Amino acid sequence: MSATNIVIRKRITRLFLIVGLILVMLIGRLAWLQFVRGAELTEGAKINRMDEIPVPAKRGTIYDRNGVELVASISSNSICAFPPEVKRGDPEKTARELARILELKYEDVYKRITKETNFEYIKRKVDDPRKVEEIKKLGLPGIDIVEESQRAYPKGEFAAHILGFVGIDNIGLDGLEAKLDKELAGIRGKIITEKDARGRDIPQALHDYEPPVPGNNVWLTIDQTIQYFAERELNNVVAQYQPKGAAVIVMDPKTGEVLALANRPDFDPGKYAESPAENRRNLAIQLNYEPGSTFKVVTAASALEEGVVTPQSRYYDPGFIKVGDRKIKCWRYPRAHGAQSFLEVVQNSCNPGFVSIGLELGRDRFYKYIRAFGFGQKTGINLTGEAVGIVIPEKDIKPINIATISIGQSISITPIQLVSAISAIANDGMLMKPRLVRQIKDNKGKVVRDYDPEPVRQVISKATARQLAGILESVVNDGTGNKAYVAGYRIAGKTGTAQKAGKGGYIQGKYIASFGGFAPADDPKIAMLLVIDEPQGGIYYGGQIAAPAFGNLAKDILRYLNVTPQLSREEVEEKTEQAEILVPDVVNTSLEDAQRILLEAGLRTRVEGEGSWVISQQPKGGAKFPRGSQVIVHLGSQGTRIPNGQEVTVPDLIGMTMREAGQLLGRLGLTLDPVGTGIAAEQAVPPGTKIKAGSSVRVIFTTPVPEPSP
């Protein structure tokens, strides 16, 4: 054999070995793909040729506590395109027709229907059936109409801040729609169709359909009728006082169930994008505000529970109280309440009295109850965006902070926190978690979840709660809350008027008026809080504008709940007679002060004459007239000196400084005969006495100190 043949054979052998090795590798690779990754690749290939279209689930219905439908889902039509099919036709014509019918821009429609995708929405949830029918008749290639679920709010703005709203994809964005989105949304289904590489339908292709699972249905604690009452009353308040905002919460104090929650301004959840963002703000849970005197119920509860006070404890109000270098005035300043019991301190909402009580409590004991009542923390209500308020850290607290917190300043809270605290007092001292949801059921009616009442903690004893309820009832019967009185029922409550805080201090002329309470006082069925932010028209006291609205609302709710009136007709008539009050003497006061004093007393004012100073009134001070009577005040000039010998009325000088008393008497043509120094504590000529100008009035001045508690 020649050398050449041997070389050729070696080369052939090597070639066969290489080819054999390659074949072995290919067979191994094929075996790996077939047996090891076969299932995975088969599924991948299926996915590549299968087109999946999601099918939204029908969102669950929301009902009130009695099964009244508040939110439902209805069917609507959406216009969609399959771009690969559209491109095989006349996309320009298709875009023109769709843009014309749907009132869209041609460029936007053309871009959508020629997109490099298998499926595109052109316009979703088209409400006009005529447009849908016109598109159907055109039979445009690659254009289809699919049925979708659309959220419907049949009652418009009703309970908007509770219900919230959803976006275009039926995803909850606010309110209960967002908070319970997982429960309401259900599980999406899908339609799967087999396509070729160019996105065209394949004859006898595979089709698969996974039906959607409808969302669960929700039953709320809200009562439609009580919610209607609450919203009606807010509408009346807005119409009369044009406030920046207002909120009302009605709660069952024994269970924590919210029976009504409403805010103004409001919005239509079905058209939420058409309303300003501020209209969607839920003031009832998001408003951080200084509560003013309504917070005094917390101060009173803390002091009674700790034994710092009893209803008979004595206090003295000279019109103000000094804490360090700060002077805290009573709302009645320069007038004063003088000597009074703790019961009268609460009835009169006397700031110096409550400051003294807060200082007696001290930081540790006071803060224990502030925290126990739930301030500075979320209540956990089933709504989005709940605020926590602002409470000064205990380590930073100073005596002046304790003093101001005791009267509802230097602390920021939310309405839901305060109504929960009021409910705790009404519920024998037990704080309950506020809740809006009673029950959740699936689409077949099976109960998925029950929401039972959740006690949080026992804040004060039952005895203290009952004692405080009686004191708060006296506030309505005999104190600043008299306009909340409802004939036949025992109402307990507290007024509040707070100047709004801003940068560098309080904002002049901006107030938040409020009234919180419960009824009936001895067996509460409802607890309520009404908050009015920046009322207009010069009337801003909680006792003047919030208390009457509270009374109207309480009357309707108690009757709706079939709560039997607790007083007989004779007792009601007797109370009505007792409602006759002494007309305050407002002679020698400014018109503004006179109007305020008369309104606080439950009387109306009619002004005659010109000027800013009251020179006479009819009926005279001290006369007894029914609440709501009209007092005519005659105006004159404050600077006009009354000639000697003319009869004038001696004003109430108690609580004034020597300078203030001297100036006032001087304007009336009288002279001051002072004894002692400090604040006017006693005057020789009683207020309201008629004497001749030129006479002198002896006034005893003393340095004020609170009377010790017995």
Image (spheres, rainbow, N blue to C red):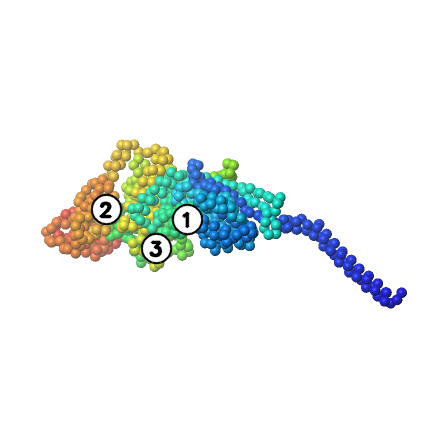
Callout 1 secondary element: helix
Alpha carbon separation for disc pair 2 and 3: 27 Å
Which of the 4 quarters of the picture holds residue 677?
A: bottom left
Say which residue appears at 23% left-offset and 46% top-offset.
598
In the picture shown, does residue 643 fall above or below 441? below
User: Which percent across, then down, holds residue 219?
Assistant: 45, 39
Q: Which residue is mark 3?
A: 501
Three-letter residue code for mark 2: Leu
User: Which percent across, then down, holds residue 656?
Assistant: 23, 53
Among all residues in the image, which is located at the extreme bottom?
3
Say which residue appears at 27% left-offset and 32% top-offset.
570
Query: Is residue 574 found left or right of 106 in the rendered image?
Result: left
Q: Which residue is mark 1?
A: 272
User: Which percent across, then down, holds residue 73?
Assistant: 47, 42
Can residue 181 be spotted in the picture?
Answer: no
User: Which percent across, then down, holds residue 52?
Assistant: 57, 48
Three-letter residue code for mark 3: Ala
Tag shown at residue 598: 2
Tag shown at residue 75: none
- In front of the other: label 1 or label 2? 1
